[in-house]
Image: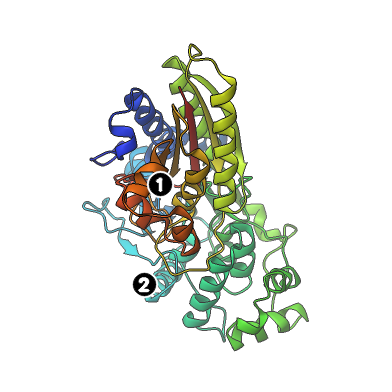
Amino acid sequence: MPTDLLSPLPVSLQTHPFREVLVGAMKAALNAVNGELAVRQTLRQEGNQLWVGETAYPLHPEGQLFVLAVGKAALAMARGAKASLGERLSKGLIITKFQPQNEPADFPVLLGDHPLPKGRSLRAARAVERFLKLLSPKDTLICLISGGASALLTSPRPPLRLQDLKKTTRLLLRCGANIHELNTIRKHLERFKGGGIVQTVHAGQVISLIISDVIGDSIEVIGSGMTAPDASTFQDALQIIEQYDLLPSLPTRVREYLLEGSQGYHPETLKPEASLFEKVANHIIASNRHACEAAHHYLQKSGIETLHLTSHLQGEASQVGKVFAAFARQLCVSRSDSAHPICWIAGGETTVTVHGDGVGGRNSELALGAVSDMDGLKGALLITLATDGDDGFSAAAGAVVSGSTAQRARKLGLQPNDFLRRNDSFTFFNHLQDCIFTTPTQTNVNDMIFLFVS
């Protein structure tokens, strides 16, 4: 099912002369990385061979095919696998965030928690362990992994407990740690991460189809590398904790476990040289680059001068917003009134260092960071979009900023900097009716920014 933007559209888009083009570009980006389509276009079976793109994998004539789908796009990806392989699939299990209306046949669905692991994520991990025990060396396990998998599937290493992982995750999210740092910690505290699924299952081969939600598309970071080798160490995990001065704040069991692990008292994650990976293949089938390229192509076809800046955008969200506001001002100053419209596209994942108790996410925080510096700019529009439809702890997927946003805010008595201090970006844009809402996107490839000047 294609993704749609929910009505009403943000006020700043409703009367914009290029509204249809900009909305079309966002839809094109999201539909290009749709989980079901990505799997269907990649996966097929011919006789006793399973094809992933142009790579063939032999299937044991007496073996069975199992599917394990974990992540925000799990349901869509599982539907794609069912459409491609049909009755050849013996069993499947889906771990995702939202309850579906229709479950694929033979694919039971369990819900996990996101972004903080709770009881459902723990129960999901137990179900996965039971599922993995069904496979024999003649069987093939197809893993469908997408963003959100790390939180949705949680299995603490003994003697750690769920509340230890929950508090540790909250600390890392609030301090501004990026996903690479967060998942390095997770891999050393949980059983299924850092190659843990490969270590648990006794299948003859494990083939993973992955939708990337991390900058650089590193398979050992996406979903905390459940079927990938891990080069990081306990010492690396400790250095991250110390970098953010979190050691005194950590739960006692976590602090002791990491310290003991760095001294060799706990087993490391599976390393690249492990022989278990001889039976494993990991394939990235969709990423932020694909989404940005689809939007770029759509805009060009619509007559818009378009530039894809990067798919590796990082940094503190509000500061990145100020940078894009500066870009907008420079474009407005340097271009003549008769120049063709231009759109710059960027993808990646910023971070938010949380100081307040407001409601928001990195996309709305980035947009809020641009509001004051875009004040009065005619013809400039900044759009931020979380491709999974979830911007942090808010109900929105992103926000829109124009040259009149600051003026409209002043009329309502809203001060952008006050909302920034409280990390309350969703509330700010909700007052202005400039939040973006989507239907379930069935994917997760980080975030996108559109800077449009006409």
- Is residue 395 placed above or below 87 in the rendered structure? below
Tell me the mark number nearer the camera, choosing from 1 and 2. Answer: 1
Dot 1 falls on a residue whose secondary structure is strand
Dot 2 falls on a residue whose secondary structure is helix
Q: Which residue is drawn at 46% across and 35% down?
A: 376
Q: Which residue is drawn at 67% across and 68% down?
A: 269
- Is residue 95 placed above or below 9 in the rendered structure? below
Task: State the image coordinates of residue 305 (x, y, percent, origin top left).
Answer: 51, 18
State the quadrant of the N terminus: top left
The furthest residue to the right: 263
Would you say residue 4 is visible in this rendering? no
**Quarter location, residue 274:** bottom right
State the quadrant of the C terminus: top left
Q: Which residue is drawn at 33% across and 56% down?
A: 395
Nearer to the camera, 304 or 62: 304
Task: State the image coordinates of residue 371 (x, y, percent, origin top left).
Answer: 47, 44
Amino acid of disc 1: Gly
Amino acid of disc 2: Arg
**Quarter location, residue 378:** top left
State which tag comes first along the sequence, 1 or 2. 2
Q: Residues within 10 Å of mark 1 (few under 14, many from 20)?
A: many
**Quarter location, residue 267:** bottom right
Q: Name the residue under label 2.
A: 120
Q: Name the residue under label 1.
A: 398
Q: Are marks 1 and 2 in contact (CB under 8 Å)?
A: no
Would you say residue 177 is visible in this rendering? yes
Residue 443: numbered disc: none
Task: State the image coordinates of residue 229 (x, y, percent, origin top left).
Answer: 67, 58
- Is residue 138 placed above or below 444 in the rendered structure? below
Query: Is 141 situated left or right of 26 in this image?
Result: right
Nearer to the camera, 275 or 74: 74
